[in-house]
Image (spheres, coloured by chain):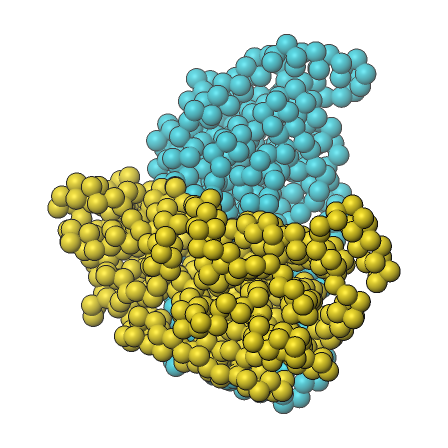
Chain colours: A cyan, B yellow
Amino acid sequence: MNFRRVLIGFSILMFVGVMAAEPAADVREAADRLAASIYVGPGMHTLRELSDGFGGRLSGSPAYNHAAEWAAAKFRSYGIQNVKLDPFTIPNGWVRGTAHAQLLTPVSHTLHLESLGWSPSTPAGGVRGEVVIVDDVSAENIKAQGGKLKGKIVFLDISKIFADGWVKVLAKLEASYPLFKDAGAIALVFPDHDRNNVLNATDPNWGAKLLVLPGAQIGMEDWQFIRRSLDNGPVTMQFDLQNTTSGPTQVNNVIAEIPGSDFPDQWILIGAHLDSWDYGTGAQDNGTGTAMVLDVARAIASAGKPPRRSIRFALWGGEEQGLLGSYAYTQEHLNELAKCVAVLNTDNGSGHPKGWKVEDRKDVKTAMQPISDSMLKDIGGGGLSLETTYDTDHGPFMLQGIPVLDLWVEMARYVEVHHKSSDTYDKVDPVDFKADTAIVATTAWVIAEDPQPIAPHIEHEAVARILKKAELDSLLAYIGQWKP
Amino acid sequence: MNFRRVLIGFSILMFVGVMAAEPAADVREAADRLAASIYVGPGMHTLRELSDGFGGRLSGSPAYNHAAEWAAAKFRSYGIQNVKLDPFTIPNGWVRGTAHAQLLTPVSHTLHLESLGWSPSTPAGGVRGEVVIVDDVSAENIKAQGGKLKGKIVFLDISKIFADGWVKVLAKLEASYPLFKDAGAIALVFPDHDRNNVLNATDPNWGAKLLVLPGAQIGMEDWQFIRRSLDNGPVTMQFDLQNTTSGPTQVNNVIAEIPGSDFPDQWILIGAHLDSWDYGTGAQDNGTGTAMVLDVARAIASAGKPPRRSIRFALWGGEEQGLLGSYAYTQEHLNELAKCVAVLNTDNGSGHPKGWKVEDRKDVKTAMQPISDSMLKDIGGGGLSLETTYDTDHGPFMLQGIPVLDLWVEMARYVEVHHKSSDTYDKVDPVDFKADTAIVATTAWVIAEDPQPIAPHIEHEAVARILKKAELDSLLAYIGQWKP
C-alpha cells in the first residue's frame, strides 16, 4: 500500500508542481497505526454504552448531564489530563412528558400525536376545538382570516409552507406563532410525513425558545384522515401535553486536549455533538459521532507519541436546538481561535464513508487532495465535496474563517432513522462506523503533524461571500450567529 | 384495439389448434364497456366510505357489522335484488382495548407493545416479571427448561422459531402455548420487525381461538434493546392488556347475486374479504378488494344485459382469522358447489396489476391464455401464474376442486402497510386500483358469458396432489379445513 502511495504522490508532484505535498512516511505510518487501532478498538462498545445506557439526551436534561460526566470520565480513562466541562446557557431547559390526543368528530379515535420540542404544556384538561388548516403563514394571511382562527386548533400544512425551503421560511414561520395567538388560535399542530404515524417531534423554533402556544406533531395517516374529513364538515379534536420547562439552563460541552509536542499553542479540533433528540436513543444522531471522537482520542492518546500540534476534542451540547454549544464556544474562546488550524466535525451518522465536505473552500480542497488520494482513498474516504451547509457544529467555526471539514457519508440509512424512535444501536453498521472513525483519525493526525497549516484563515468578507452563495446569509443574520 | 385482438387470436388458432378460443366480439365489447364504466366509476369513493367510515373491521366487531350492513345496502343500491347476510360462527369475538408496558430494569422506560389478537386481558394490574428468550418451542425444549420459566415473561425469538417457515411451524407453535403455561410462564411476547417500533399486532393462532396466556407484540427497537440488555443481567418488565372477549360470535358474510339469463343455476363467484385488522383502517387489506367487488357488481348490474350465467358476489368475514367465512360458506352451501364454474378472488391489495394466479391448474391457465392475451394484456393484467397458496379466500373453493383465480398484483406497497397503522386510504393508487377492478370485471364477464365452463372441477385426489406439491397438506389437515 505504501508503495502505491509513493507512486501516486510522485505523479502528482510531476504534473502539478504547486500542489501540496503528500504526508511524510513517518506521518503515514503513525496514521496507519491509528486506523488499525480503531479497527480493532472499542468504538462499538463505547457507542452501545452511550446509546443504550443514557438513551435520548436532550440538552440540559438529566440524561445529557449523566452522559457528559460519562464522556469526561472516558477521556480521562484514556490518560488525557486536560478534560473539562465547559458551560454555556440555553434560554430554556425542556423535558418531554406525556401526550394524549383524541379525535372527537366526525368519529372518535385515538390520534398519534406528541409534543413538539419546547412546547409549553396545555392547560389542565388539554385543549379542545375545531381544526383549521393553514397553508400560508404570512402576517397578511393570518390577519385576513378575521375571527376564523378564534378558539381553533391550527394545522400548519408544512408541505406548502416550506415550498421555498426551510432556510428561507424559518423567520416568517417563527414570526407567525404570536400572530396565531393574537388571532385567538389555541394550539398549533404540524404534520409528520412518515408511514405508520411515526413521529420525530422536534422543535419548530431555533435556539431553545419556548413556543408561544401548545404545539404538537401529528402522524401522517392521522393528518391525512383529518384533511379528508374536512371535506365533509367540521373536525374537532382534543389533546393534552404535559412537559417540564425550566428557564435558563446550564449545559456543559465536554472538552479534552492532548497537548502538542512542537506547537502546543496551535490546535486542531475534532468535534461532534453529544446531545440528541429524545425519541430514539440518538445512536446515529449523534452517538456515532460522539463515539468516533472518543475513539480517536483514545487511539491518539495511546499512540506512544503526542502530535506535533495540540488536538482538542469537543463533545457539544445544544446542537439540536441550533448549534448552541459550538457557537457559545466560539464566543467564549474567541481569543484562542486565531491558533485553531482546522476543525473536523462528524454529525452525519455513520453511513458508508465518502470523504469530507470542505464547505466551499477550494484552497482546503487543494490542500486535502494529496492526503485524500494517498491515504484516505484506500480506507474509503477519498472524496472531497465543496457543498456548504450550516446544519451542524462546523458552522460557527466556518463563520470565524477557520478551515473546517465535515465528515461526508452516505446518508440514506441516517435519514430513515433521523430523530425517530428507530435511531438506536441496532441500526449501526460496524464496518462503516469503523471506517468513518479511521478517516477522522487519519485526517486529524496528518493535519496535526504537518509543519504548515493546511490552509489560512479567511477574512470576514470572504466568509460572507461563501454564505451568500449558499443562500445562508439571511438565515444566519436572523438567528444572530452572524453579523454581515 | 379490437383489430389487434383479432390478429392475435388468429395466430394462436393457426399454430395451436387445440387452444381455447378467444371470446366472441359481442362479449369483448360488453366487457370493454364494463371496464370503461369502472374507469370513470365511483370505486375510489366507495373505498373511502369503507376505510375512513368504519375503520378497522375485526370479524364480529361492531365496526364489521356496520360495514356489512353498508355493503348490503350498496349492493341493493345497484338494483341487485338477491342480497343477504349469510351467517357463520367464530369461536370467539374479540375487540382490542388498551395496552401499557414498561421496562423496569435495567432502566425504566415505556415500551412499544400491543396486545396480540385474541389475547385475553392480563389480571388487573398487569403481569410483571423477568424476561426469558426462547428460540425453540419444541415440547422437549420447554420441558428441559425445568423451573426456569416459572413466573417469567417468555419472549419468542420468531426469526429462529420460524426458520423452517410459518406453514411448517404453526402446529408446533400452537401446541407450545399450554406447555409454557404449564411450565409457569405468565405471558408470551412476540417481537415485530419494522423500524420505529411499528407494530402490526395480529394473532398467533389459526381460527379465532383465544390464547391461553396473555400475549403481546413488542416493537423491534425495544426488542433489540431488551435482547442486548440481557447480555448484562436480568431484564424485568410489566405490561397490562385490557381486551373484550365474547364467546362464540355470529359473523355475516355478505352475498349478492345477479341471476344469469341462460344458465341461472350455474354461477361464478367474485369475492373478497370485508373484515380487516384493526390497526389501520384495512384500506389495502382488504378495502380495495371489497371496493373492487362492489364496483364490479355495480358495473355488471347496470350493464343493460344480465350475464348468461349467474354471478354471485361475496364479501367474507373471518378471513384474517383463517378464511373462516369462505370456508363456512363452502360447508353450508356444499350442495350448490357443483354448479360453481369459477371463483375469482381479490385480496393482495391494489398494486400494479400482473394478472391472475391459477393455483397450479395448468388447464385453467390454458383456458385463460386467449382471454389474457386478447383482452387482459391491454389493460395490464395479461400474466398467469401457477403459484399455489392458501392465504386467502380462494382456498376453500380450491379444496373443492373448483377452478379458482386469485388476482395477481405487485405487492411491494401492500407489504409495507400490511396489518399496520399505515393501511389507510391515502396509500391507494387510483390508477392501479381501477386497472385491477377492470381486470376482475373483464375476466368475470368473459367466463360468465362462455357457453363452456372455463375448466372442469377436479377430483379430491387431484387436489391432494396440488396441496402436497405446494407443501400445504399438513397445515390444512392440522387446521381441519382439509381431509386427506
- The residue located at (40%, 30%) in the rendering is A42
Q: Position of residue B249 (x, y in %)?
A: 33, 76
Relative horizontal placement of residue A182, taking residue A51 as reference (left or right): right
Which residue ends up furthest to the bottom in the rendered image?
A: A147
Furthest toward the left, the residue is B147
Q: Position of residue B406 (x, y in %)?
A: 57, 59
On screen, residue A39 above or below A478: above
Q: Is residue B81 left or right of residue A72?
A: right
| Residue located at (29% from left, 75% from top) | B248
Q: Is residue A17 left or right of residue B208?
A: right
B113 or A331, nearer to the observer: B113
Q: In front here: B167 or B478? A: B478
Q: How many marks?
A: 0
Q: Position of residue A129 (x, y in %)?
A: 51, 84
> Residue shown at 29%/54% (left/top)?
B174
Name the residue at 46% across, 18% down.
A305
- Decide which of B44, B123 is in the foreground and name it: B44
Q: Is residue B384 above or below residue A248?
A: above
Q: Position of residue A169 (x, y in %)?
A: 68, 64
- Quarter that holds the C terminus of chain A: bottom right
Report the quarter where the N terminus of chain A lies. top right
Q: Is residue A274 above or below residue A306?
A: below
Which quadrant of the figure has residue B284? Answer: bottom right
